[in-house]
Amino acid sequence: MFKSKQLPDCFYQNKPILICPNKPTPNHSLYLSNLDDQKFLRFSIKYLYVYKNSVCIEKLKSSLSMVLVDYYPLAGRLRISEDNEEKLEVDCNGEGALFAEAFMDYTVEEFVEASRWPNMSWRKFLYRVEAQSFLGIPPLVIQVTRFRCGGMVLCISINHCICDGIGSSQFLHAWAHLTNKPNADLSIHPIHCRHLLRPHTPPKVTFTHPEFTNHTPHSEGHIDLTQFLQSQPLVPVCLTFTPSDILRVKKLCIPSLKCTSFEALASHTWRCWIKSLNPPSSLKIKLLFSANIRKMLKPELPQGYYGNGFVLGCAETTAKELINANVHHGVKLVQEAKKSLSNDYAKSMIDFLEQQRVKPDLSASLVISQWSHLGFEDLDFGEGKPVHMGPLVSEIYCLFLPVVGNLDAIKVLVSVPESFADKFEYYMNDLSHREVKFGVEEHGEVKKMLI
């Protein structure tokens, strides 16, 4: 397995500064919807861009101060709501985004050749804010790292409670637009109001929401896969699927089934993940995936809504059923999960979270988040598009990433236990029609390691 090279240290000539909106902005508390301040979203999404040519630092600072006039909540600070200590809100105080400048004795070519996926040394690309909790970290933290070759790395950390992936992409493109055309208007104006997703009074929960509920009894034989994964040394596995690869995955569906690239690749990834971990055959497993609800709701969310506008789709089966069937079975489950999502389902989920502020059921779940087809790879600050785009870190959550230069390709990134990585990679790359039955011992490999 390829070992990603460790990076040299960053050098900071100056202390980070706060970039504030360059005009007065509203000073108020911004309500966050139940989709925004979910407990499992209380972290920052960290985006990493690598460019062959650096953009003028002063130009980036100036355009950032401009775009923060429109996106002023990102210049505020998160805090606990005065009305409900279980909810968060944004104090839109214009305090500013944290901006750091650094230098690394490295080149773009060296980075691309030696660092195919995230490792711990990549964290050097983002200034570490010392804080007692994530509430003490500015919602927007940016570091620009110049390379000796004239290239640069742009790392952006955006608090997930304020933006989802679509919202993050919208903000980043607005920033790039004003960097290139400082006097231009934004093509899409941000919609700040989160009251569009307020719960009913009283709440009306009309669905069971399996994405949050765990119906498996915690018996002596119960296995928490996430707990197991987090107890192991993890390594990232990153695989690129070209359009022809994705077509081959679709052909693994027997009998054939019309499906999207996401449905086929999500099913294949889920199946290979379970197959490599080899849990007990009777274990109930789930695939959770983010689904955009902006156009699903009635009325639709307006263009420019940059808050969290997604719910989790949930496919369920047992390990044995997923493995012993071919990709067709998983695809059908994903399609059924997508079909169940509707305006009523989304509003029921919002009301469910009003009653129970719980995290999703991750006990035996693979979570997939899709970053492809959101425009991330097209971000151009005036010196061309990036040669690399992806996350700063790799987690046990699976990301479907864009591939720079190939719009229809998808890069799959997920961290798995080091002892399972080669097996997972083998199964992911095996696109033949050979089928291997589950055939595990009674307790399975994962359970034997837990005992």
Image (cartoon, rainbow, N blue to C red):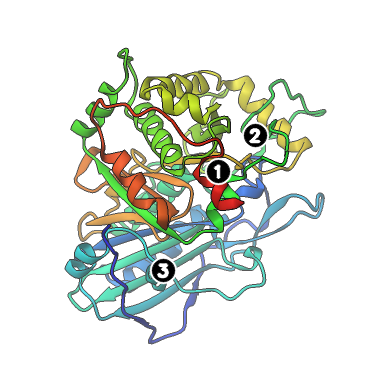
| Quarter of the picture holding the N terminus | bottom left
Q: Position of residue 447 (x, y in %)?
A: 57, 45
Indicate which disc, 1 or 3, sits on the residue closer to the N terminus.
3
Question: Label 3 belongs to which residue?
Answer: 120
**Which disc, if any, is residue 197?**
2
Q: Position of residue 92 (x, y in %)?
A: 63, 58
Indicate which disc, 1 or 2, sits on the residue closer to the N terminus.
2
Disc 1/disc 3 C-alpha distance (Å): 29 Å
Indicate which disc, 2 or 3, sits on the residue closer to the N terminus.
3
Disc 2/disc 3 C-alpha distance (Å): 37 Å
Classify 182 as above or below 142: above
**Which disc, if any, is residue 256?**
none
Residue type at numbered disc 2: Leu
Residue at position x 61%, y 54% from top?
A: 42
Q: Position of residue 90 (x, y in %)?
A: 65, 55
Question: Is 186 on the left-hand or right-hand side of 361?
Answer: left
Question: Is 88 on the left-hand or right-hand side of 439?
Answer: right
Question: Label 1 belongs to which residue?
Answer: 307
Disc 1/disc 2 C-alpha distance (Å): 10 Å
Residue type at numbered disc 3: Met
Residue at position x 76%, y 54% from top?
A: 81
**Element type at mark 3:** helix
| Mark whose residue sits in front, 2 or 3 | 3
